[in-house]
Amino acid sequence: MTVTSVLPEVQAFLARTHSLYLDGKWVSSSGEGRLPVFNPATGSVIASVADATYEDVQRAVGSAKNSFRKGVWREMRPADRERILLRLADLVERDAEILAQLETLEQGQSIMLSRLLEVGGAQSWIRYVAGLTTKITGQTFDVSIQMPPGARYTAYTRKEPIGVVAGIVPWNFPLLIGVWKVLPALAAGCSVIVKPSETTPLTMLRFGELATEAGVPDGVFNILTGTGRIAGECLVQHPDVAKVSFTGSTPVGKRIAQNCASRLARVSLELGGKNPAIVLADADLGRVVGGLTMAGFMNQGQVCAACSRIYVEEPLFDRVAAGLQQALSGMSIGPGMDENAFINPVVSSQHQKKIQSFLDGATEAGAEMLQGPAAPNEQGFYVRPTLVINPDDSLPLARDEVFGPVMTLTRVKNAEEALSKANDTPFGLAASLWTGSLDAAMRLPPKMEAGTVWVNSHVMIDPNMPFGGIKDSGIGRDFGTGWLDAFTETKSICIQH
Ligand code: NAP
């Protein structure tokens, strides 16, 4: 066991009485409510944050709107906005270990994952998006308007920031996904209010302080800690919020879409998945086992794009099952602060119970299971990593998003059967194909119903590769060179001359 010691800066941050972060400073909530933050590895409370009220939401939106109207940020030279955002990435790099420890302590994930993906990824994505501030362009048009006769016109478009953006963040990668919700809006020149999950608000609060230190003007980046039921709903319904950028579950995403539709607010939705992997008989066994172990169990399967259903062609099935069983039995389980523990607690006791009820349902139905190590203690929110073999397709665990360390492994006759089962889901976020055949690698991905298809890997993302879902997995794409389009409106300007 190699346990990371908690830094004094992290202890001091946890001991603070956290308020709301509005207008570039800490501001008390209008209410008395506090929300506890738990350490998933021990089940104990490590901090508390303000529970934002309706009045707090009005105040936050007011700050964002004022800053947008004043125009300090949106009218700033793009290169200056870029410089400030690059400085923000440098500050995240400077405070990387503090942020990584906070993330592990509130979310439960491995400190190695926090360092590499959450905090390392945050830097990469901030730097990528900072570069987009200087690439916002419109078009010029030759037009043929005939009124009045003989008049000549020239038209062009400007991409203008959309206004006040609400970013709503889930608990599975609180800092990284927070960056995905906030940064493109900032790069486009918008003012932002972010609402982290009530379960994992701490890293975003620290990030807000860093944004101010980097030079983001007051009121441009505001943070409301609170519940989805009150702070989230009020934000989404607020008439001055021009756009909601949401990552979270499909049911909440649908509710947000309805709320936005009623006032024609723009919305993008990155939602849940039930992501399949199709393994053909000619796949490289070692690659399959290593890749799918990581894809299914990283962050305890609490990854939107995690692999949760594996379909293996008959001839390779037994060897894949044996390889995954060996991987499960070699896993170590323990707190996220233990660098060697591959499986860590899930985020909350509520989520632990939800996953366990899926597993209980499968046990009652007589499903065959292979399991990894049991929890090291009863206080932490641990779930045993589990592989369910050939489950009935109607089983809730096989159909619904479990969002835990659970995968199903199903034997199929051929690629066509695998494809039909893989696509038989309301979700369409991500999928993977494992094969040694170039022909299959070219033929099958276009038929796989998902926003992203990986070949011979799964769950790999990059700032330059668009990411998002089809069907019940969402609307819109994050990342890529077109990322800021969703945070701008196109204005046509037509000049008679
Ligand atoms: P969630 O329950 O949908 O919550 C997400 C966020 O929405 C939280 O901040 C939540 O606040 C807030 N919220 C809840 N109800 C709301 C409402 N009525 N109006 C406005 N906001 C509301 O999701 P989660 O359990 O945190 O996260 C797991 C889910 O996120 C999974 O389904 C996963 O697949 C999905 N996800 C998708 C992607 C992707 O890119 N497609 C990435 C990561 C995660 P509270 O925390 O206070 O309830």
Image: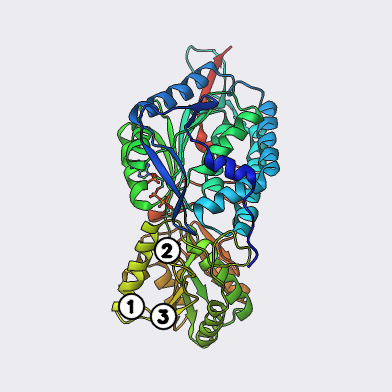
Q: Amino acid at mark 2?
A: Lys
Q: Amino acid at mark 1?
A: Thr
Between circles 3 and 2, the one closer to the viewer is 3
The percent coordinates of residue 303 (x first, y second) are: 49, 58
Residue at 53% x, 16% y: name it: 70
Q: Are marks 3 and 1 in contact (CB under 8 Å)?
A: yes
Residue at 57% x, 46% y: name it: 479
The relative height of residue 435 versus residue 169 in the rendered view (above or below) is: below
Residue 421: which numbered mark, if any?
A: none
The percent coordinates of residue 398 (x first, y second) are: 37, 71
Classify 10 Å Cα crowding around label 2: few (below 14), some (14-19), many (20 and above). Answer: many
The percent coordinates of residue 93 (x first, y second) are: 69, 44
Q: Is mark 1 within 8 Å of ligand 1?
A: no
Q: Is mark 3 within 8 Å of ligand 1?
A: no
Residue 363: which numbered mark, if any?
A: 1
Q: Nearer the viewer, residue 428 or 65?
A: 65
Residue 274: which numbered mark, if any?
A: 2
Q: Secondary structure at mark 3?
A: strand
CA separation in Å, label 3 and label 1 = 8 Å
Q: Amino acid at mark 3?
A: Met
CA separation in Å, label 1 and label 2 = 20 Å
Between circles 1 and 2, the one closer to the viewer is 1
The percent coordinates of residue 184 (x first, y second) are: 56, 37
Q: In the rendered image, which quarter is residue 422 located in? A: bottom left
Viewer can see residue 355: yes
Is tag 3's residue or tag 2's residue first in the polypeptide sequence?
A: 2
User: Label 3 belongs to which residue?
Assistant: 369
Residue at 59% x, 59% y: name it: 337
